[in-house]
Image (cartoon, grey):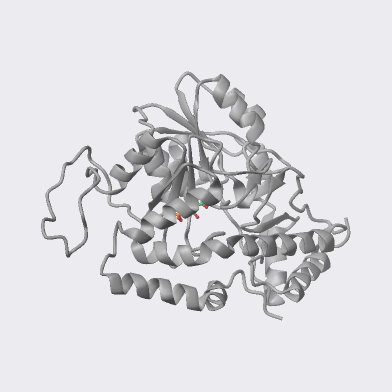
Amino acid sequence: MKVPFGDPAAEYASLRGEIDAAIRRVLESGIYMLGPELEAFESEFAAYCGSRHAVGVASGTAALMLALLACGLEPGDEVLTVPNTDTPTTSAITHAGGRVALVDTHPRTFNMDPDRLEDAITDRTRVVLPVHLFGRPADLDPITEITRRRGLILIEDAALAVGAEHRGRKVGTFGVMGCFSLAPSKVLGGVGQGGIVTTDDEALADRLRVLRNYGHAPGLSLDPANLLGGGFTVLEEGHNERLDEIKAAALRAKLPTLDDRIERRRQAAALYDRLLADAAAMIPPVDEDTRNVYHSYNVLVDDRDAARQFLAARGIATRVYYNPLLHRQPAYAYLEAGPGSFPNAEAAADRMMALPLFPQIADEQVEAAAEAVVDFVGPA
Ligand SMILES: Cc1ncc(COP(=O)(O)O)c(C=O)c1O
């Protein structure tokens, strides 16, 4: 049995009528940027998350960079994040004029370790940027307490965690801003790149809207039928990072059924949990007060690369995320963080692999993948 790593086309097929109608609606309207679909998607996404505002942007990368710019980093300001994330988390810090500083992760959850966060804070720290890794909320109680007590700005990298909850509250609403990716492989995957920033702060939302659109003051009509279009005020030097109307319309078509797909992800994860409970592999821990949306299902095994070959020989796809870790990448040699700098993250990175998990996966496919893992690793 073949088990692919994901199936975006199957998701499209299950919503074909809604997505086709949404895209046609945009094409026929003649308004392709900054129009009614984006505005509607922003309010629907904000309502879904429980935030007052949401600002659509071109990618999760843009969401992070514009959020960091919007909070006014000064040169030399440090932003604390984790080494086991994708490059955009850290490159956004640099592009927004800040300095990257890394904190080790917790050996149980692989999310930012709050105890090490406290130790890593310096006089130059301005922002704390935890990642909700693979759809599991970071340890938000201590992280929000520490950032509040130390007067720091909390921004969440929720790129992988649309719909995840901590104590019944959605991620993206704990920090001053939450940054989401809407790329095809994400939990709310669009028909191309996309991102969105959530915030309760109206001034920040306004600034994000200016920053994503060249720095122009809002109000300029992009409707070609407008008889007196043109003319603008440049408030600051911004970027070209809007979320297009076609993409916003397709995302609107998907949002109403997002929770159904998340529940299917959670069922498939629970099946993996049961099937791998007695295997010599570490499976993702389940916490009562969190809703993990399982962007991916990552296990730790010995001899990970051989395990992947073994699964591939049975037709089962796997992935390895964020390996080597960021501080071991050439772009971050300047951090001078050698092997052993972040021991928990490093120990996990050597053993971690992601098993197939997506909303359309069949139980039989989960069973085949889990059986292959058990056959490779043996009993605990
Ligand atoms: C943790 C994390 N943050 C940010 C991003 C950036 O998102 P995007 O690819 O939409 O720019 C990614 C991308 O996959 C990611 O994994």
Picture coordinates of residue 201, whole percent (x, y): 43, 35
Q: Decide if residue 177 is on the left or right side of residue 221.
A: right
Picture coordinates of residue 223, whole percent (x, y): 21, 61
Q: Decide if residue 139 is on the left or right side of residue 18.
A: right
Picture coordinates of residue 359, whole percent (x, y): 64, 67
Picture coordinates of residue 197, whole percent (x, y): 44, 46
Residue shown at 54% from the left, 51% from the top: 48
Residue 185 appears in the rendering: no
* 93 versus 73 height, above or below: below
Res. 301 image quadrant: bottom right
Residue shown at 37% from the left, 54% from the top: 39
* 272 versus 134 height, above or below: below
* 345 versus 229 height, above or below: above
Residue 221 appears in the rendering: yes
Quadrant including the N terminus: bottom right
Quadrant including the C terminus: bottom right
Q: Decide if residue 42 is on the left or right side of residue 220.
A: right
Q: Decide if residue 13 is on the left or right side of residue 349.
A: left
Q: Nearer the viewer, residue 305 or 190?
A: 190
Q: Nearer the viewer, residue 144 or 340?
A: 144
Q: Nearer the viewer, residue 351 or 124?
A: 124
Residue at the farthest bottom position: 1
| Total count of labels | 0
